[in-house]
Image: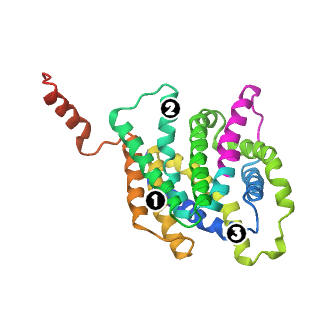
Amino acid sequence: MNKPYWKAHLMLLAVAWIYGANYSIAKIILDPGLISPNAFILLRVMAGSLLFILFFGLPTRIERSDWPGLLYCSFTGVLANQLLFFNGLALTSPIHASLIMICTPIIVMLIRVVQGESMNAVQWIGCFLGFGGAYLVIRSSYHGEGGGDTLSGDLMVLLNAVFFGLFLTRAPALISKYGSFELMKWLFLFAIIMCLPFGMVQLSQVDWWKMEPVHGWSMAFVLVCTTFLAYAFNAKALEYSHPSLVSNYIYLQPLIAALIAIWLKKDHLASWHLYSGLMIMAGVYMAGGKLPFDFEKKCLGIKKILFREQE
């Protein structure tokens, strides 16, 4: 049976644009301080829970033995992930955040190594190259506008990527058992309870009357598109394609984020953005085990020559 890959490409392209736009659109409401990041996250998890239940029904019963795993995934994939991302984004720039976030596949690889998997030499080189590019992004914060605040924001975004990497290593087992949409219902419900102490007071202090229409549209985009549609499209795309195709679209996000940030005048592009971005994307490519130009075979040939090994 032929799979309609074109549908997957359209959905993944939409996801890339949503995530790429989110970096700048979220800052439209975060930069003026109209709502705090913690209050925004509480709104987001409540909206996500409501939308997934509204479109896919009430959550079904979960086995008690899976509750610790659900709590772990809710904390790493929703609460810590989103609190760190939005608090970091409020301090740093959209291009910084988008470049750092594409280190996530490398972080997942390193977590799997800690769990007992192995990597070849090229994958290790890719990890060092990717983190080298991230280091250039973070190091630039010392010399840019915002100084220490931008540096703190960059580090929060990087830590957010670590928590999301931890989520990705645990979530597949629960998804295969309960389904992606069913899992999201429970994750957002748990996240509401965990997020209340962080955002309840700040949410009650929001001056809604100060918001203009552009702020309302920006909030709606984050709550509906970034929180609900992007994940729904990602999950549906997996029915028509394979995980490697989904992961390939991560390379588009920094480009889209940069274009939209410049268009909305939320950031500017510098030459070092290109250098660090290329380093990170090359590192992610190599860490994924994708070796261009028969690199591995050539390395083996060089090794045989150097150490006089026989065929």
Amino acid type shown at disc 1: Leu
Residue 171 place in picture, x, y as percent: 61, 37
Q: Residues within 10 Å of mark 1 (few under 14, many from 20)?
A: some
Amino acid type shown at disc 2: Arg
Q: Residues within 10 Å of mark 3 (few under 14, many from 20)?
A: many
CB-based contact (under 8 Å), mark 1 and mark 3: no
Find disc 1 in the rendering and name its residue. Answer: 252
Point 16% across, 25% down: residue? 307
Residue 161 place in picture, x, y as percent: 57, 47
**Residue situated furthest top in the rendering:** 310
Find disc 3 in the rendering and name its residue. Answer: 29
The quadrant the C terminus occupies is top left
Q: Earlier in the sequence, mark 3 or mark 2?
A: 3
**Which one is in front in this view, the residue at disc 1 or the one at disc 3?**
3
Find disc 2 in the rendering and name its residue. Answer: 112
Point 61% across, 51% down: residue? 156
Q: Helix or strand or loop: what does disc 3 sit on?
A: helix
Residue 214 place in picture, x, y as percent: 70, 76
